[in-house]
Image (tube, coloured by chain):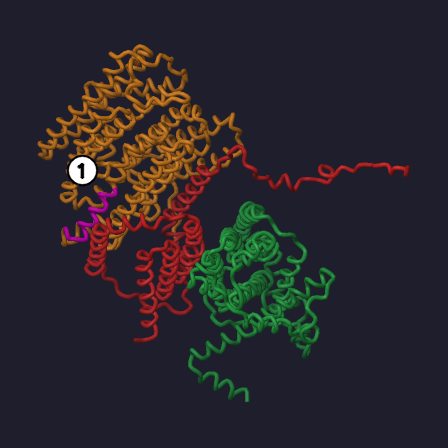
Amino acid sequence: MLETIMNVWEGLPLVMQIMAKITLIVAPLMLAVAYVTYAERKVIGYMQVRLGPNRVGPKGWLQPIADAVKLLTKEVIIPTNANRYLFLIAPVLSIAPALAAWAVIPFDDGMALANINAGLLYILALSSLGVYGVIIAGWASNSKYALLGAMRSAAQIVAYEIAMGFALVGVIMVAGSLNLGEIVSAQSGSIYHWYLLPLLPLFLVFFISGVAETNRAPFDVAEGESEIVAGFHVEYSGMAFAVFFLAEYANMILISALTALLFLGGWLSPFQGILPESAFAIPVIGWFLDSGIHWFLIKTAFFLFCFLWFRATFPRYRYDQIMRLGWKVLIPVTIVWLFVLGVGVAFGIGPWFA
Amino acid sequence: MTFEIPDFMPVIPELFVLGMACAILVIDLFVPQARRDITYGLSQFTLIGAAVLTIALASPETRFTFNDTFIADGLSDLLKVAVYLITAVVFLYSRPYLQDRDIYKGEYYVLGLFGVLGMMIMISSYSFLTLYLGLELLSLSLYAMVAFNRDSARASEAAMKYFILGAIASGMLLYGMSILYGITGSLDIKEVSDYLITSSAGLNVPLVFALSFVIVGLAFKLGAVPFHMWVPDVYHGAPTSVTLFIGTAPKLAGLAIIMRLLVDGLGPLHHDWQGMLTILAVLSLAVGNVVAIAQTNIKRMLAYSTISHVGFILMGILAGTHEGYAAALFYTLVYAIVAAGGFGMIILLSRRGFEAENLDDFRGLNERSPWFAFIMLLIMFSMAGVPPTVGFYAKLAVLQAVVQVDMIWLAIFAVIFSIVGAFYYLRAVKIMYFDKPEDESPLPKALDMNVVLSINGLLVIVLGIFPGLLMSLATGAISW
Amino acid sequence: MNFEAFLFYFFSVILVGAAVAMITVRNPVHAALFLVLTFFTSAALWIMLEAEFLGIVLVLVYVGAVMVLFLFVVMMLDINLARMREGFIRFLPVGIVVAVAMVSVMTLVIVRHFHMEAPERAGADYNNTEALGQILYTEYVYPFEIAAVILLVAIVAAIALTLRRRPGTKAIDPAQQVRITRKGRVRMVDMKSEDKS
């Protein structure tokens, strides 16, 4: 049975194999996006002592499906004097990089669509493209609020990309590779070998920049409901709006997955090197304790929860405070830590860099 | 891959200047405005320290390092020391000017030091890549310095013009270099020269284009006619202290890149670039000297005089002999000294809220200060080439070199236009001595500036009486 | 035509088309976006030439940062299109002459003088980034460091020219804001309750 499936698989043309793999990544991703929106409303609801959605389906489980159907059936309104082509292309430019970046994410050892050498650079380059969707949407809408939102977001993303890039440089220095799979493998050993502890400042900088890059609370001045209505997508409706929404959540999941990969050892088990080898041989429990894709998903889910947690608990930053945090706090922190790392790696000092 | 650690000894002066510039940048942050002199003192210390290091490391043989992209030889040692000293004088002259205009900031000196570093890199470059990067480092510092007085609209305009035309010039130079790279397959000056000697192709179309682009780029940077449009505007618009800087030390670095690029690298094509340089030199002499007569603003007048001096420097180069190169080097050194004195005088006469920019501001200087009128007289005589000032010997050396290669018509042409040029220099002298002063206010008393400016002026005549000293240095540097 | 050639022509056509569109479209924002497309397709071409590091960095730096700031400025500016068109016709002949000259020189140089065998395809494990790093920090370390100094000067110059403390701005110092305490803001007033009269 298994063998015949494998044979059929091998027999497929390369393009179809790749297509199938893409489907295997994107379909669950879209489903995850849908249920992250549900989780968001639930989590924030409980944190604010409310119930959240609970009417559609059992415990409100069908709420995201209902939302999707509603958005699909709504009309896409194009404002007068808006630039038609750019207006419609902007959501696509927003979601395309968010999805394309998943091509190099390894879910388990060797389980990646494209195992390329410069994987991390590729992700950095693609995440820097996402800003075009926002800018073009803001400009093409021909609306003042939208343009203001786009300007805010562009400045914010460009500023935080630098901090993010520097944080990644630290990871690259220690791992000695740009390949995401190799970066994870370099963290194997035990939980102390994860980059969380040796690169703690970079981890914080990376995750904070990640939150800012995705324009999420408390850095959501680009949307800023109370000031500029909804920022860059104020003029969008129906499916065009939904695509922006999808892109934002896909980016959130991407940042969470990246944080898990780069600083928490991806698919590596936290019990590795702590429990004796024999523990991993126990039938079901052993499989769970051993490294595998489930650890990657658990870690990603944890960081996703953090996104929601932040949104529920932090007040929004003021625009100038965001700029100050990015340029004057995060970037200097990364530069200082890069120096520390440089010395540590070059001379083999300390418990981690030896 | 094996990697040999390069020899750092020859680059120690560069490292020192870079390190000090960065240190000053940081120290300056913690220095209150009232004690800005600390920054100034450190900058001067850097220049003097670099001079000491360069002299200590100087040796007769040629030293290469960093895969032969860096060269240190007699020419580089002499030019570097000259750049340090001229810049030190420039910094000294600038201080009262900057203080009076509330732009006495640390960044001025830091940018100046980075400019010096750029000049050092240019002087010591032996590869197109480092040469270009050094040029950009210098240019970028200068653009920023020109715009330094943000409250002056004229300075901002000058900076814009300088920046845009400078970028075009860099583009030209870079394009020429890239074609050369395409032809020869190397960025190394030695290898390019070797290729040109061995290849029997001679001069072909791509090479002509490469040569033209390189020469146009250099002419732009030096301000030779017909690529001189920016010179008067920038000299006029920039704060005088920056004009002083632009007008002096970078000319030395400019001579260095001509020597490296045209003489060392494209030396085998001498016959071809000689013609191009001749046109540039003739036009520069003619336009520079004639247009200067019509100027009433002394900064513009000195700008046009610079253009004519560039013509003389190019004449020395185009002769293509060791005597010619030595004469060009001598001329450039002399010009830098004299120009420092000339712009220094403008700064001396300026004060808070008043720029002594017009020729009329020099009226009756003799009655206000006979001593500085005399210094200015020496400087003007030297620019005009009146014996026994050093300017006379500089012009004589260049003319001799040109005559030696049988370009007598060019020498006669140069002499005629020097005489035309003498008119406006002597007019300045006449205004100082025979006109009544309009402005009776006494000259400011800054001891260090007065002393150095006096030495600067007297140097013109001392070197004029004993030209052999500087001349032997120049000849020694050229015949390596 | 194999797949690789197809990709090459695919990207090349877009590249050339976008470059032409960039200089001919009326709207400056559209021009900037076409420039972005040009960069992006040239990055794709570089990646096909096994220069993946350069290709990705082109996207990261030029598309992701430089052009974003450029668009930023272009969107804010009110550009007078009519005046820009005037110059276009006037300078067209000069532009054509320069373009023709440059193209012919490039062709001459490339065709006649730069004979280079197509380098062998590197294997899949070949790491372009590492190779570039090796050569940049050894053979070209001196120019590399000078380039770094140039960037430093650019930063210093930009800050020195723009950072001016003008009087009368209402900017708030965040440090001061953070440092406030309850004592500075809240005054507890002890008020006696009044008797009903």
Chain C colour is red
Residue highlighted by disc 1: B280
Is residue C185 shown above or below B197?
Answer: above
- Give the main secondary structure of the magenta stretch: helix
Tell me residue C11's x, y (percent).
34, 66
In the rendered structure, the colour chosen for chain A is green
**In the image, is residue B62 above or below residue A116?**
above
Q: Which chain is orange?
A: B
Magenta residues span B203-217
Q: Position of residue A261 (x, y in %)?
A: 57, 64
Residue drawn 71% across the image and 37% down it: C184
Q: Residue at x 32, y 32 (%)?
A: B246
Q: Quadrant of the N terminus of chain A?
A: bottom right
Q: Is residue B400 visible?
A: yes
Instruction: Place residue B138 in its image quadrant.
Output: top left
Q: Amino acid at mark 1?
A: Leu
Q: Please, which residue is most extreme toward the front here?
A: C197
Tell which residue pokes out farthest to the top in this image: B367
Q: Residues within 10 Å of mark 1 (few under 14, many from 20)?
A: many
Q: Is residue B354 above or below residue A30?
A: above
